[in-house]
Amino acid sequence: MLLVPFSNPLFEKLFLIFLSTLLSEDLTCISVGILVQAGKLEPVSATLACTLGIFLGDYLLFLTGREILSLLKKKKRKEALENSRLYQRLADGLKHRFLSTLFIARFVPGTRLPIYTFSGMIAKSSGPFLLITFIASLLWTPILIYLSFLYGQAFKKFYTSNSLTASILLAIFSIYLLYQMVLLLIQKNRREDVWIRIQKIPKLEFWPSVIFYTPLIPYVCYLIIRYGSIRLITASNPLIPMGGIMMESKFSILKSLPVQWIAKATLFEMADKHNASVKLYDFLKTLNSPFPIIAKPDIGERGRGLKLIANQSDLDSFVKNLDVNYIFQEYHPGPFEAGIFYYRMPGENQGKIFSITKKTFPVLIGDGKHTIEELIKRHPRFKFQKNTFLDRNLKHLNVILSVGETFSLGFTGNHIQGCMFEDGSDLITKELERSIDTISLSCHGFFFGRYDIRYKSESDLKEGHSFKIIELNGAMSESTNLYDPKFTIWKSYSILFQQWKLLFQIGKKNHEAGTLLATYKEFYALWQSYQDYIKQIDPISKEFG
């Protein structure tokens, strides 16, 4: 007898409506309105099914918030959440206007998911939430269904078809499209985001990596066919495990360089945290000025987890929360930073500087009127990476800078973290090339990669002295001048393709000279290790990066 309802066609339709609201409540309500108008659904029962499904979906968001909070507490990451931009904004509204905010969120597109989820994190009981969201659902659902019903009536006057199914589907699609357009018109943030995405199209430096690297795939396939194997890239730098394609220790690479050329550094190893702490504090005593100091993961990933530590108190707090090996490095005041991409063909005694990239750090200039958040969103460049800057400067967003006052948005020499890259070929001189060559030749087994350096003046750098190496990257490093906003897309890709061709050529020559290639099994194991490591470092990046 319990199975009888499920054999009822009406019940099946209502149950399907109920479940569909969990996937897309707006599209479900619109579809129900059109189907009611077409005589395919009974209005009261269909509206009730929608309402109950929407109400359940709201409560599931609330429970999700509870579960997220519990998980963060277990992993000791609650502080990272509380320091996030979204948390700070939601906390103010919900803690003082809990019930009214819940009610309004049902009628303001784009606010329901964050507000209802966050409610689960801060609410002491679920009773008030359930009451308000049920009332809001009872009001909202019939309104949207009825508007869709009216649209269906109007649609019939302008469109006729022999196929009822085609008419219904076209009506649903057209009103949903209209609904999304209305949301776009009434939501300023959504309009701004769409316009920013459009403006990014001709700006290669801001393309998502999955799009940017797509043209590289067929070219790499060509190189594999021409030179014999993808595994050749693992022979590009015998000095570095797997050539430096991923998961290499930055500290081990630094130790292979002549000590007079590198910024002083020490490794904090998690295997022996107590001795690592002693070693770290002994290291600080060797520096002329212990603070500020740079902290970065020994196995890095595009600036993730990098931190400028200002004082002893911040250092103590930072060390206490570490989960992975970290490099602590003296802070070089610069003020300039650059990436020098170098290569040398095996068997040759002299290499070449392939490119130099100048790095310009993001700095805001105040106008005495707008807050830091507003200046970021209005800036012709910074608006393209606004989420990065807003999250990083959460505590300063409401500050109004005086006219001409400057504010640094970041210190990381990484494009993803907001740094601008420009071609620095004017810095390449015979003297600098000689210095880089001397350093590289002293590292037996290094042939291809990028030095990240800091220096005091361009004149000194051109003469080949007074700079410090803060990092050396191997096979997967890039000639970052390709992100110069002045370069055409064609120019950027020609640089990228050229460096990959060199990578294969160097790997092949090293292999012919006796360097072993990594196996596919080792490739896979390395990839698995990389995925596990990213899961470890991501929480650290969000909390401290």
Image (tube, rainbow, N blue to C red):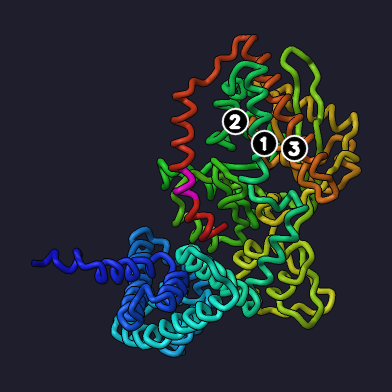
Q: Badge 3 is on which residue?
A: 479
Q: Which mark is residue 157?
A: none
Mark 2 or 1, nearer chain start: 2
* Secondary structure of the residue carrying numbered label 2: helix
Residue 375 is left or right of residue 174, and the answer is: right
How crowded pointer 1 is (Cα within 10 Å; few <14, some 14-19, many 20+) is rated as some
* Secondary structure of the residue carrying numbered label 3: loop
Q: Badge 2 is on which residue?
A: 244
Mark 2 or 3, nearer chain start: 2
Estimate the x, y position of residue 212 in percent, counting from the top left.
67, 44
Viewport quadrant of the C terminus: bottom right
- Residue range corresponding to the magenta coloring: 533-537
Q: Is residue 243 above or below residue 486?
A: above
Query: What amino acid does circle 3 point to?
Result: Ser
Query: What amino acid does circle 1 point to?
Result: Ser
Q: Nearer the viewer, residue 516 or 2?
A: 2
Residue 346 is left or right of residue 395, and the answer is: right
Q: CA distance from mark 2 to mark 3?
A: 15 Å
Residue 303 is left or right of residue 498, and the answer is: left
Q: Nearer the viewer, residue 171 or 229?
A: 171
The residue lying furthest to the left in this view is 1
Q: Badge 1 is on which residue?
A: 477
Q: Is residue 105 visible?
A: no
Q: Are marks 2 and 1 in contact (CB under 8 Å)?
A: yes
Q: CA distance from mark 3 to mark 1?
A: 7 Å
